[in-house]
Image (cartoon, rainbow, N blue to C red):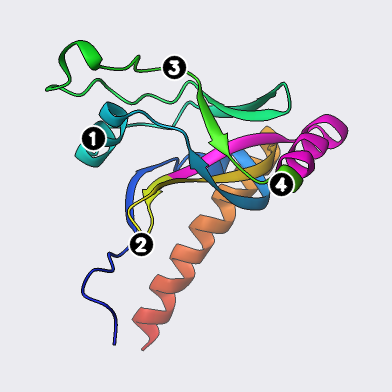
């Protein structure tokens, strides 16, 4: 039986285009260093990570261009909406991600922003490689065929 205080995972923002535009190799869960008004704004559910990415600076991973709008009741203590935010990872994970980006030409793309069971803001980060136009067309073909196959199977009985 689950504890009463345990909360389910609450997805706040999702990058749905990432799986279409990138071939995802590996995913990592990272914490985010946030201020108080940023956490409250994320809980309101208005943040977006669609055009954001992660980059390395001075041996740290930073989330760039993620939009967390200002908290309405935040007055003078409000935050900058598109400021770079530090991602909290273990040193071994950081080295692995930086190595993949430098050697293999991969990109770090955020897939979803959510609150885990303990109420902490987490980011699912993907190591991905950009798809070419023909790869995207192939993805669309597979998706359409899957839908058509499902329709045919239902009609058949």
- Location of residue 144 with respect to 84 vertically, above or below: below
- Which stretch appears magenta? 93-112
In whole angstroms, how far apart are the C-alphas of marks 2 and 4? Answer: 22 Å
Relative placement, left or right, of 149 versus 70 is right
x and y percentages locating residue 13 in the rendered image: 36, 41
x and y percentages locating residue 87 in the rendered image: 55, 35
Is 66 or 71 nearer to us in this picture? Answer: 71
Residue depicted at 72% across the width and 21% down the height = 58
Q: Is residue 28 magenta?
A: no
Q: Which badge, 3 or 4, comes first in the chain's sequence?
A: 3
Q: Is label 4 in a helix, a strand or a loop?
A: helix
In whole angstroms, how far apart are the C-alphas of marks 3 and 4? Answer: 23 Å
Residue bearing the label numbered 3: 83
In whole angstroms, how far apart are the C-alphas of marks 2 and 3? Answer: 26 Å
Residue bearing the label numbered 2: 117
Residue bearing the label numbered 4: 93
Residue bearing the label numbered 1: 40
Q: Which badge, 2 or 3, comes first in the chain's sequence?
A: 3
Q: Which badge, 1 or 3, comes first in the chain's sequence?
A: 1
Crowding near the residue tagged with mark 2, few <14, some 14–19, many ≥20 C-alpha atoms within 10 Å: few
Tell me the quadrant of the picture where the N terminus can be found: bottom left
- Location of residue 99 with respect to 27 vertically, above or below: above
Q: Are marks 1 and 2 in contact (CB under 8 Å)?
A: no
Q: Which badge, 1 or 2, comes first in the chain's sequence?
A: 1
């Amino acid at each position: 039986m689950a504890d009463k205080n345990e909360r389910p995972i609450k997805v706040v923002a999702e990058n749905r285009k990432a799986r279409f535009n990138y071939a995802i190799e590996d995913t990592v869960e990272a914490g985010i260093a946030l201020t108080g008004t940023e956490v409250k704004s994320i809980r309101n559910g208005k943040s977006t990570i669609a055009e954001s990415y992660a980059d390395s600076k001075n041996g740290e991973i930073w989330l760039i261009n993620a939009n967390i709008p200002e908290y309405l009741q935040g007055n003078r203590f409000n935050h900058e909406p598109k400021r770079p935010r530090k991602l909290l990872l273990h040193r071994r994970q950081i080295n692995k991600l930086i190595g993949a980006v430098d050697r293999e030409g991969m990109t770090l793309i955020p897939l979803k922003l959510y609150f885990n069971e303990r109420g902490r803001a987490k980011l699912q980060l993907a190591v991905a490689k950009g798809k070419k136009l023909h790869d995207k067309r192939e993805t669309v073909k597979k998706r359409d065929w899957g839908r058509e196959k499902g329709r045919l199977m239902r009609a058949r009985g």
